[in-house]
Image: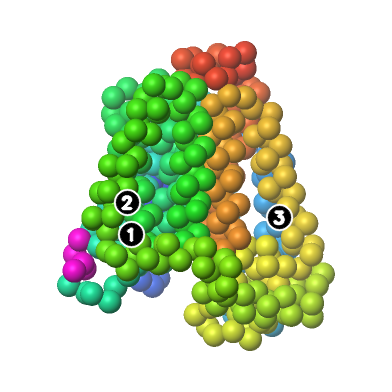
Amino acid sequence: MRRIAWALLLIFVFTIPWEYSLDLGAPLGNIARITGLLVLVAAIPALLQSGKIRRPGPLQWLTLALYLWLCCSFFWTTVPDTTLMKLRGYLQEMMIVWLIWEFAESHDDLRNLMRVWLAGSWVLAILTIANYVSSYPGSVDQVRFAAVGQDPNDVARFLDLGFPIAALLLSGSEKWPGKLLGAGYFPLGFAGVLLTASRGGFLAALAALSGCAVLLFRRYPKRVLGGLLVLPAVAGAIWIGLPRETLERIGSISEQLQNGDLNQRVNIWSAGWQAFLKAPFCGHGAGSFVTAAALAPIDTAHNTVLSILVEAGLCGLVIATAIVAVSMRSILTMRGTVRIALMTLMAVWMISTLVGTVGESRTTWLLLAVIALIHRLTKHEHDELEPEYSRPVRGVEWRMAEPLR
């Protein structure tokens, strides 16, 4: 049963980047929700069959604490129906932290997780480009393109997280299919980010690609320098191939930072701050941001910290901060290529938190789960990480995962 649960977990991870592009409607929901429930159906019998469970780590306990605190907010929420719906959603999103911790047991499992995550990002990029091809130039007023059912800003954030994973696969001992999966993602993913015309997504992409350049330069300095020489040709292709309006929107970043309201975000943040001041310690309840800040139903917080403050108060923010701190501490104990890749992933994620509400995203909890898994493996695998990332992580021992208890 554990093998079945693990196979379903890989399928679940594969669907996360493009989950909203395949929605079967009520009561089934999107594809990631369906596959996630299937994983649970297989995971519970697998644990009962083995009669043991892996000892939770700090991330698992803190995630459970945050979820329980959000559950407690149901007793004082201003919107009980919305809170109940959000709690169901959080459970489906946060469960991946435990599932990966429990069922991923070796470095091979980690590599498979990376592969399917990146493959899912491929699907999202292809769907985004397909939307552009099918829409432009027929719709002259359309500036932003995204996979069907997806928000352009979310698409850009999901695609940005794929770049460090692609670089990590390229720097390792992958065979040619894995190398192709990683190398091909860079032009495909960047094209997808540009088509979304997401200004925050574009800045995060630059940060991700910079980190990837540092990572790959350690292993392939000549190839990275050669890649820099073709940048003018890439810029020319972008100038010719992308809609002028899309490029103009991306080019307005400086203007928005200096004189703009960040596309109404400043007004939303101001309203959110006033709502926080009314219930600073416990918040207004999970999912209550729009109501507490008196915003339109289609609005979101556009800032992860502010969203937590309004909905879960300072108590919730303390737990969420501890989750990030534990993840950062885990990264800092690593070395070489893996450390650079994970630091880049966290930098991209943190940029996303400034202009987006990413706490409700499965991708956030997938990232945190992978960081915790790598940290566990670096402490408990017996075999050295050969030859995968061997050059930058020389001297790090990998031992067998903790015995199940």
Rendered image quadrant of residue 379: top right
Q: Residue at x 32, y 68 (%)?
A: 245
Circle 3 sits in a helix, a strand or a loop, which is it?
Answer: helix
Residue annotated with mark 3: 320
Asked whether residue 76 is drawn in magenta, I would say no
Crowding at dot 2, Cα within 10 Å, few <14 / some 14-19 / many 20+, comes out as: some
Circle 2 sits in a helix, a strand or a loop, which is it?
Answer: helix
Chain-order first, disc 3 or disc 1 = 1
| Mark 1 vs mark 2, CA separation in Å | 6 Å
- Asked whether the residues under the numbered discs 1 and 2 touch, taking CB atoms below 8 Å apart as contact, a structural biologist would say yes
Q: Residue at x 27, y 64 (%)?
A: 243
Residue annotated with mark 2: 191
| Mark 3 vs mark 1, CA separation in Å | 32 Å
**Residue numbers of the magenta segment:** 133-137
Residue 264: image location, x then y, percent: 55, 77
Q: Is residue 339 above or below residue 129?
A: above
